[in-house]
Image: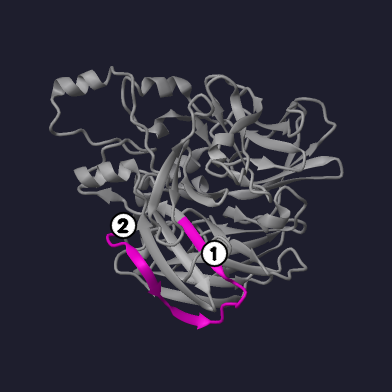
Amino acid sequence: MTDEKKLYPNYDMDIWFRTCDQEITEPLEGKLKGTIPSWIKGTLLRNGPGCKKIGDCQYKHVFDGLAIIHRFAVKDGRATYQCKFLHSDVYKKNTAANRIVVTEFGTMAVPDPCRTIFDRISSMFNFSIEQTDNTVVSVYPFGDQIYTMTEVPVLYQIDPESLETIGQKRLPRSLIVFHTAHPHVMSNGDLYNVGLSTDKGYVVVKFSNNKEGDIFETAEVVGSMKPRWRLNPAYMHSFGLTENYFVIIDQPLCVSLVNMVRRYIVPEPFSTTIVSYPEYETNIILIHRETGATTQYTTDTLFFMHIINCFELDGKVLVDLCTYKDGNIIDAMHLDAIKNMQSNPDYGQWARSRPKRITIPIDAPENTKVEATLLADVGVEMPRINYEMYNGRPYKYFYGMGSDVDTEYSGRIIKVDTETGNYKQWYEPQCYPSEPIFIPHPDAKDEDDGVLLSSVLWGDNDHAVTLIVLNAKNLEEMARVDFTTPSQTPRCFHGWYFPDRTSVKL
């Protein structure tokens, strides 16, 4: 397809189709340009799909490829790069069979050619589905250990230096069936996450950081709320919290439990259980962190994947999030949709997000309709803030990657001023950055006194990855380290920065 015929000529869809054929297990030196501040000493770990095929089998959704962990170690003004596949049970089964043997979010398992037709028909009625443990979305600290996550209640511990897979944790199904891929880490090491329980509905689960024991053994439900539709709970990728409240967005993008049951009879990918009801409003649920009391409000229909931040100010709860007009963002991440995007005039709208703020008066009666207003007229996703100091508190700035595919520079890093709506941006041609992670200066006096780290891919070079270091105040480039990789470098999702106290030698 020529550029003249492309609807989105500045967006390179091929970045989503890369497969890593060769891991980098020893730290790879890169080419440094500029100066990395000497006070940056730590490890940036990132998680995402490492392949788009197994043997002759192709994955169908960006959520589905086998998880690969990327490691950027920064110390003494230098940086190195490594990457290694997560050795989950699914990874072992797929690589041993050289095909996709477990159904993923959007991809059906390939039938075993050695099984008879009778075996396959019988398996349709055994009322069991092998659940994926491909924790491909995010990486978080749980106490003094590091785990990869997705939306099923399975986590894998990894070694932050070698990237070796250490072990698996499964949360009890009696406690939680699904959870978000984005727990909140508190200053004392406690974690909170929101999930779906079979009996209580939406639940907030607390993991207490008991330094003398297993943090998973402390897991307990500290808040709950029934979904508005018992058989169609909301699909939730993230949630928010403030000083006094947990914030749950009950959006009309739902998981159909009826379709879930149907999968036990007619095996289908999990994505077939996602249903959208754009004719309904979006609900916001506040659960008081001390009393467990719940209050529900409504706002105009909006859909979301990521909360930016939530906080309390002047008798109000403010909820900032990246919003969509409809639930087509899930469809937009099917690889066939990406492959055909250049001839799809609707694709730009499917992928277009806008940051909005929902304002909730704390004393407003139950079911009050509250307003959602635009924070900035710019497409931005994968939002990050000065998390350590401002999560759940009043803040001014957030950072993200550009989400609009129909702009001159589809790959951008963006800084938004939530008070003015103004924004700054960094971009280069053929540049596709990951979420920018904020690292505060050790003597910071301002909210944005620090740097942003981002892993950058290039549309014109699939055997390369770059670590970009930007001044968080003005998005001016301070340094970059270019790495040449022995095979393709795939696109990643989310990551976490671990300062030297939890990182290891370069």
The amino acid sitting under disc 2 is Thr
> Marks 1 and 2, Cα distance to the nearest angstrom?
23 Å
Position in image of residue 158 (x %, y %): 43, 52
Mark 2 crowdedness (10 Å alpha carbons): few <14, some 14-19, many ≥20: many
Depth check: give the residue in front, 85 or 254. 85
Q: Residue at x 55, y 28 (%)?
A: 196
The residue lying at 44 percent from left, 56 percent from top is 159
| Label 1 packing within 10 angstroms: few (<14), some (14-19), many (20+) | many
Q: Quadrant of residue 102?
A: top left
Q: Is residue 230 visible?
A: yes
Q: Which image quadrant for residue 92? A: top left
Residue 187 lies left or right of residue 326; in this view the side is: right
Q: Nearer the viewer, residue 65 or 408?
A: 65
Q: Sequence-wise, which precedes: disc 1 or disc 2? A: 2
Measured from the top left, where is residue 160 in percent x and y?
Answer: 46, 58
Q: In this view of the protein, can residue 408 be seen by the observer?
A: no
32 within the magenta span: yes
Say which of 33 and 70 sits in front.
Answer: 70
Q: Secondary structure at mark 2?
A: loop
Q: Regarding mark 1 in the picture, which secondary structure is present there?
A: strand
Farthest residue, direction front? 212
Q: How many marks?
A: 2
Provide the residue designation for mark 2: 19
Percent x, y of residue 248 = 65, 35
- Residue bearing the label numbered 1: 412
Q: Which residues are magenta?
A: 21-46
Please tell me whether residue 193 belongs to the stretch shown in magenta: no
